[in-house]
Image (cartoon, helix red, strand yellow):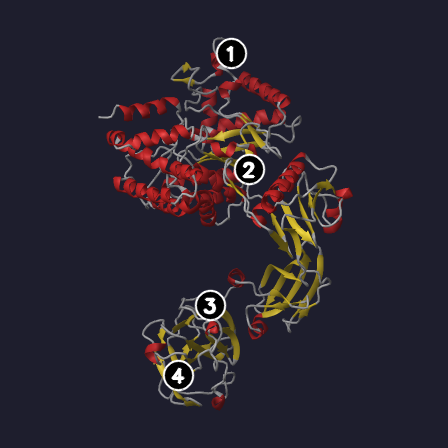
């Protein structure tokens, strides 16, 4: 605001306060682009002209209210404008013409030298000068986004000049600005201060999203270390000015680099940043063209079985894609160009890397000139590299064991290829029936199993679960030793109960039998000692004394399992003994801690699955138990649930929580995750999509799930995917803040209605019309099955007589669906009888 005798608006430099008092000057008319394609992407002709030279110029402005700017097409007066709110409406204050621009000037009074963020938004683009220096220039046409731009500015003690130059190309014309506190961490989060740009001659130079004037005020010094794609250092430098000088990289070969920046700010704060860039003279290589290739697939003579399998996979799918045959040859006899699969002496020489551990699942694929290198650990790393190369670079998808989408291409050229990933979770167990196929699991990077499938690359397997009775069978011991089993209400019980864990003979038997299992079946990673799938723990005084002391039934469980684990530790140092934190043992003990060779499988069976674990009040106690176990257990393995056990086929709107819950498990140091689902037959609701999406999330919990779902919808369902996606969104939209879904969601639940069923069936009718083939029509009908099932359950008499039940039977029998719920045949028979005899 202006005070008496003041001719320029001034405001105190206060973070958070909107700047609402401005001198405005305009409109100043611009010339439309002759080339319409440049409109909205480049400033209009005339914008770069400095119209303020009579007043010191844009970089040395001396202006006051009432001054008049004259230019060849007219004049404009500086006028005071005090906005009633945070947004300055230039159409109201200046003009509604276009193309034009206006100046906006104000002064900020700072009580000290300081750095702050100037946070602003403009419609359309423009330029910004602070204390006479251009620090921001944006030519693109755009709408107003409050705080859309945030630039660090160095304010000096006293008066500071702020000059905007804001362009108008049509529609709304407005801007807003305020100061916000500066922090180095926030600066690092919003955008890298530095980057490296490639030049046409193969060289490179340091660059920044900020003008050099900003950097000179903001940065005291930056140290730069650059590595090539193999992690080898190639350039080091230090700069405290002349930031944008060229960087003379030692190689002109086009390749990828990583730059590391250690930035010392003028404020004394430090920021560590990194980014990746490409530089060098591009050369194009042809992998295949017109059914021909000059490439071979090169394998070391010492390649592992999974690397040999991966090479055959690579050859097979490349042939499918290109029509060209890629012969498999030995690395020792190969010559360029070639695709090398598996780490070998040649790759070691090229990369300078040491051989990765056999079990390391991190993979790399990259080119060294015309050669392509794909490598990782011998067990699964190289194999995963091959499958990811086929996915990422060639578009291969293995949606289900039966459905693969392999694009055809006549030619593939490249100049630079490079990618590396490590698994987000060590042991990944996708427990859908669709995911049990060992080849599908290998292609989709699933390595966990309860059992020992003959899977390429092998698995990180878990021997059994609920093993108290299998280890100490009541049929073998109860008649002679009833004291081995739970004491309940003063009586020893041999059924639907547990073991007496304080009994030393029970401990001796379990030690012996776990040791025997490890010796006879050394192929497992984890050997289970866990409660039966009932409640009824032992109530004897000795057991309950430990329970009382530890505040949980898990106390005596860990006390018992620790002793078993200690007994096998020396003979089997690379094996684990596993147990459950499940139902009555879910809460962690007060003082006893699991040994280092004990794995605790933590279970989420009581949770709400409509909302994620962190935010739903229904899951508060679960999160408390999870975080406690995470601190206490050296190895936490999650047993999570993603299905409605009572109704496998019924709509189950829990997709929104899959990613957030897996991230929560990762944050709590889980070494493995099993997502238990519809595991006994085909036919779970969206089972194919769920198995595929979960495999992606277990490998990388940070993927874009929406992108994966869309990719599946259109890849698996073709043109019908548009409608299947509509049904998917309709179903997921059933969840509200007060919706809580457990593992037993029922057809009569309030989230379902006849309107939902009718809308869903109408969508499927449209999907069937555009199905590209008979196979895709069958997939559409499988997706429709949950809606048919829901109607049969809700209104069985209607379903029996309107054809719904008949359609359900036809599809389910055709697709071999044998389980409608975990209970199996009794539930299956009960469902069909309830509909057939409905009245």
Could you classify mark 2 by the number of other residues whose Cα lies within 10 Å: few (under 14), some (14-19), or many (20 or more)? many
- As measured in the structure, the alpha-carbon distance from the residue carrying label 3 to the one carrying label 4 is 23 Å
In the picture, the disc for residue 446 is: 2
Secondary structure category for the residue under label 4: strand
- As measured in the structure, the alpha-carbon distance from the residue carrying label 3 to the one carrying label 1 is 74 Å
- As measured in the structure, the alpha-carbon distance from the residue carrying label 2 to the one carrying label 1 is 38 Å
Residue plotted at (24% across, 32% down): 798
Mark toward the start of the polypeptide (3 vs 1):
3
Secondary structure category for the residue under label 1: helix
Across and down, in percent, residue 138 comes to 49, 72
Residue extending furthest toward the left: 839
In the picture, the disc for residue 476 is: 1
Q: Are marks 4 and 2 in contact (CB under 8 Å)?
A: no
Mark toward the start of the polypeptide (1 vs 4):
4
- As measured in the structure, the alpha-carbon distance from the residue carrying label 4 to the one carrying label 2 is 64 Å
Secondary structure category for the residue under label 3: strand
Look at discs 2 and 1 and give the one toward the viewer.
2
Residue holding disc 3: 149
Across and down, in percent, residue 554 comes to 47, 29
Residue holding disc 4: 26
């Amino acid at each position: 605001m202006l005070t008496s005798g003041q001719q320029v608006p001034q405001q105190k430099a206060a973070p958070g306060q909107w700047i609402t008092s401005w001198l405005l000057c305009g409109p100043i008319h611009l010339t439309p682009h002759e080339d319409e394609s440049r409109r909205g992407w480049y400033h209009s002709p005339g914008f770069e002209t400095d119209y303020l030279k009579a007043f010191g110029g844009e970089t040395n402005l001396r202006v006051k209210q009432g001054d008049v700017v004259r230019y060849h097409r007219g004049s404009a007066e500086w006028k005071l404008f005090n906005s009633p709110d945070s947004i300055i409406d230039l159409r109201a204050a200046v003009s509604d013409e276009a193309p034009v621009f206006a100046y906006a000037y104000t002064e900020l009074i700072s009580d000290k030298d300081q750095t702050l963020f100037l946070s602003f938004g403009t419609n359309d683009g423009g330029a910004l000068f602070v204390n006479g220096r251009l620090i921001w220039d944006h030519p693109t046409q755009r709408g107003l986004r409050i705080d859309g731009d945030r630039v660090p500015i160095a304010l000096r003690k006293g008066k500071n000049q702020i000059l905007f130059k804001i362009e108008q190309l049509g529609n709304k014309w407005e801007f807003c600005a305020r100061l916000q506190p500066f922090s180095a961490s926030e600066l690092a989060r919003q955008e890298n201060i530095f980057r490296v740009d490639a030049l046409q001659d193969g060289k490179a130079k340091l660059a920044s999203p900020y003008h050099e004037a900003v950097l000179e005020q903001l940065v005291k010094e930056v140290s730069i270390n650059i590595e090539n794609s193999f992690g080898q250092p190639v350039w080091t430098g230090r700069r405290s000015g002349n930031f944008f000088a060229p960087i003379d990289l030692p190689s002109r070969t086009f390749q990828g680099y990583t730059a590391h920046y250690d930035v010392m700010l003028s404020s004394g704060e430090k920021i560590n940043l990194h980014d990746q860039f490409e530089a060098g003279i591009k050369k194009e290589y042809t992998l295949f063209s017109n059914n021909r290739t000059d490439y071979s697939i090169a394998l070391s003579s010492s390649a592992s079985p999974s690397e040999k399998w991966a090479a055959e996979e690579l050859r097979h799918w490349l042939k499918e894609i290109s029509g060209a045959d890629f012969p498999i040859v030995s690395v020792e006899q190969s010559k360029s160009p070639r695709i090398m699969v598996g780490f070998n002496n040649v790759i070691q020489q090229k990369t300078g890397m040491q051989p990765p551990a056999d079990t390391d699942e991190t993979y790399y694929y990259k080119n060294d000139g015309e050669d392509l290198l794909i490598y990782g650990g011998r067990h699964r790393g190289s194999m995963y590299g091959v499958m990811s190369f086929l996915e990422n670079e060639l578009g291969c998808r293995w949606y289900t064991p039966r459905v693969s989408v392999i694009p055809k291409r006549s030619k593939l050229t490249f100049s630079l290829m490079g990618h590396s990933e490590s698994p987000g979770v060590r042991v990944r167990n996708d427990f859908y029936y669709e995911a049990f196929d060992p080849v599908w699991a290998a292609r989709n990077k699933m390595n966990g199993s309860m059992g020992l499938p003959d899977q390429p690359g092998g698995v990180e397997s878990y021997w059994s679960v609920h093993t108290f009775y299998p280890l100490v069978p009541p049929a073998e011991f109860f008649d002679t030793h009833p004291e081995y089993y739970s004491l309940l209400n003063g009586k020893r019980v041999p059924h639907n109960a547990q073991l007496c864990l304080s009994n030393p003979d029970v401990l001796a038997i379990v030690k012996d039998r776990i040791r025997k299992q490890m010796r006879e079946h050394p192929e497992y990673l984890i050997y289970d000692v866990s409660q039966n799938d009932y409640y009824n723990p032992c109530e004897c005084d000795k057991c309950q004394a430990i329970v009382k002391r530890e505040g949980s039934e898990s106390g005596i469980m860990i006390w018992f399992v620790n002793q078993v684990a200690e007994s096998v530790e020396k003979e089997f140092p690379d094996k684990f003994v596993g147990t459950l934190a499940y139902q009555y043992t879910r809460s962690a003990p007060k003082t006893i801690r699991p040994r280092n060779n004990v794995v605790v499988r933590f279970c989420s069976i009581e949770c709400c699955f409509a909302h994620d674990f962190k935010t739903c009040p229904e899951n508060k106690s679960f999160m408390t138990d999870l975080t406690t176990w995470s601190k206490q257990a050296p190895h936490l393995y999650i047993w999570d649930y993603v299905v409605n056990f009572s109704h496998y086929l019924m709509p189950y709107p829990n997709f929104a929580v899959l990613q957030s819950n897996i991230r929560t498990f990762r944050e709590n140091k889980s070494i493995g995750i099993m997502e238990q689902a519809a595991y006994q037959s085909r036919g779970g609701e969206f089972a194919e999509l769920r198995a595929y999406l979960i495999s992606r999330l277990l490998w990388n919990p940070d993927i874009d799930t929406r992108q994966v779902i869309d990719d599946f919808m259109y890849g698996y369902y073709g043109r019908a995917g548009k409608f299947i996606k509509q049904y998917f969104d309709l179903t997921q939209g059933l969840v509200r803040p007060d919706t809580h879904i457990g593992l037993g969601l029922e057809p009569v639940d309030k989230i379902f209605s006849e309107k939902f069923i009718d809308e869903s069936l109408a969508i499927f009718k449209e999907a069937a019309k555009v199905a590209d083939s008979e196979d895709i029509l069958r997939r559409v009908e499988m997706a429709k099955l949950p809606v048919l099932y829901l109607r049969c359950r809700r209104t069985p008499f209607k379903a029996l007589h309107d054809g719904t039940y008949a359609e359900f039977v036809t599809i389910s029998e055709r697709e071999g669906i044998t389980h409608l719920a975990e209970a199996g045949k009794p539930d299956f028979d009960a469902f069909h009888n309830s509909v057939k005899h409905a009245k």
